[in-house]
Amino acid sequence: MKALVTFMSTAGGRWLRIIVGAALIAVGIMLGGGWWALAAVGAVFVLVGAFNVCLLAPLAGLPVSGSALRR
């Protein structure tokens, strides 16, 4: 778990979250209906990537902030 959180705090991890989030938003919008929930999850991915936050970090006992994780 710590390896995943460490990767997600890097620039590559942040971009991965943003790209996956954008894809989820696109799929949710294209499918419509109840799939809008998928778009909402995608928005969360984009936001946490953009703001450099890792929501899984507390599960591994690490700080939420990406900059604090890299220190």
Image (tube, rainbow, N blue to C red):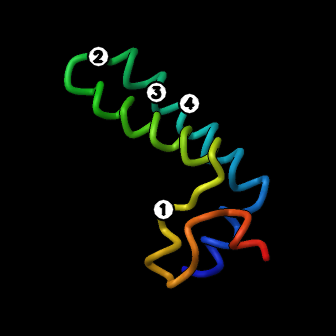
Closer to the chain start, of discs 2 and 4, is 4
Residue at horizontal 28%, vertical 27%?
Answer: 35
The span from disc 2 to disc 3 (Cα, nearest Å) is 10 Å
Q: Which residue is denoted by mark 2 in the rendering?
A: 32
In primary-sequence order, the first of circles 2 and 3 is 3
- Frontmost residue, 66 versus 2: 66
Query: In this figure, which residue is indicated by the disc labeled 4?
Result: 22
Which residue type does callout 4 highlight?
Ala
Which residue matches tag 3? 25
CB under 8 Å between callouts 3 and 4? yes
Q: Quadrant of residue 28?
A: top left
| 23 or 52: nearer the viewer | 52
Type of amino acid at the residue the image marks with label 1: Leu
Q: Nearer the viewer, mark 3 or mark 1?
A: 1
Among the two numbered marks 3 and 1 on one chain, the one whose residue lies closer to the N terminus: 3
Say whether marks 2 and 4 touch (CB < 8 Å). no
Q: Residues within 10 Å of mark 4 (few under 14, many from 20)?
A: some
Q: Position of residue 52 (x, y in %)?
A: 65, 52
Q: How crowded is mark 1: few (under 14 residues within 10 Å), some or many (20 or more)?
A: some
Q: Which amino acid does label 3 sit on?
A: Ile
Total numbered circles: 4
Gap between marks 1 and 4 measured at Cα: 18 Å
Q: Gap between marks 2 and 1, in whole Å? A: 27 Å
* Mark 3–mark 1 distance (CA, rounded to whole Å): 19 Å
* Secondary structure at numbered mark 3: helix
Whether tag 2 and tag 1 are in contact, CB under 8 A, the answer is no
Which of labels 1 and 4 is toward the front?
A: 1
